[in-house]
Image (cartoon, rainbow, N blue to C red):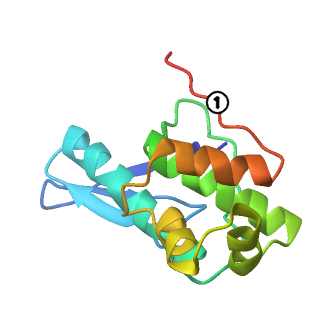
């Protein structure tokens, strides 16, 4: 769902520039490809957090070109983004989610904050009141 194609561009100074066509806010670099890809996950999460903060729909991940790598946010962040995407699709505001969960607004704010280490059971509860489920797969 959140597998975004990543573009790696070697720079003249030996570093590797990382961009995401679908999330133009996510830009980073690394000393080599491995470091660039590691930094790219943080850049992707940061870029997607701007959409959440601005209450905009998340960008849809395009189909990767042949041989192009994709990256996704970490599992916890992906679960939070899934809840946010469901809220956006259903037109549910944070206040309504708080009411459905019996929570205070700061709790919902933390749940949607990609930098906050929310507990999985809280994310599952939010998904449940939105009619969704969280699935975890180890592949």
Q: Is residue 32 above or below residue 9?
A: above
Q: Nearer the viewer, residue 42 or 16?
A: 42
Q: How many marks?
A: 1
Q: Which residue is mark 1?
A: 135
Q: Quadrant of the N terminus?
A: top right
Q: SS at mark 1?
A: loop
Residue at the (13%, 53%) spot, across then down: 14
- Counting from the top left corner in percent of width and height, residue 37 is at 31, 44
Q: Who's the residue at 67% across and 65% down the image? A: 58
- Viewer-side residue, 26 vs 46: 46
Question: Of residues 116 and 105, which is closer to you in this image?
Answer: 105
Residue 65 percent location from the top left of the image:
62, 39
| Left or right: 81, with 138 as reference point | right
41 or 103: which is nearer to us? 103
* Viewer can see residue 79: no
- Residue 57 shown left or right of residue 37 in the figure: right
Where is residue 24 shown, x and y percent of the image? 52, 70
Would you place residue 99 above or below residue 35 in this image?
Answer: below
10 Å crowding of disc 1: few (<14), some (14-19), many (20+): few
Outermost residue toward the bottom?
54
Residue occupying image coordinates x 77% and y 75%: 96
User: Which residue appears at 69% of the width and 62% of the height?
Assistant: 101
């Amino acid at each position: 769902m959140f597998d975004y194609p990543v573009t790696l561009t070697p720079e003249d100074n030996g570093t590797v520039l990382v961009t995401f066509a679908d999330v133009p806010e996510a830009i980073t670099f690394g000393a080599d490809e491995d470091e660039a890809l590691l930094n790219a996950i943080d850049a992707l999460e940061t870029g997607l957090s701007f959409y959440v903060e601005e209450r905009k729909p998340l960008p849809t991940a395009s189909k990767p070109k042949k041989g192009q790598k994709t990256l996704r946010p970490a599992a916890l962040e992906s679960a939070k983004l899934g809840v946010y995407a469901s809220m956006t699709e259903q037109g549910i505001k944070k206040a309504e989610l708080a009411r459905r969960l019996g929570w205070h607004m700061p709790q919902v704010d933390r749940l949607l904050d990609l930098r906050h280490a929310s507990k999985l059971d809280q994310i599952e509860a939010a998904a449940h009141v939105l009619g969704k489920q969280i699935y975890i797969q180890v592949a």
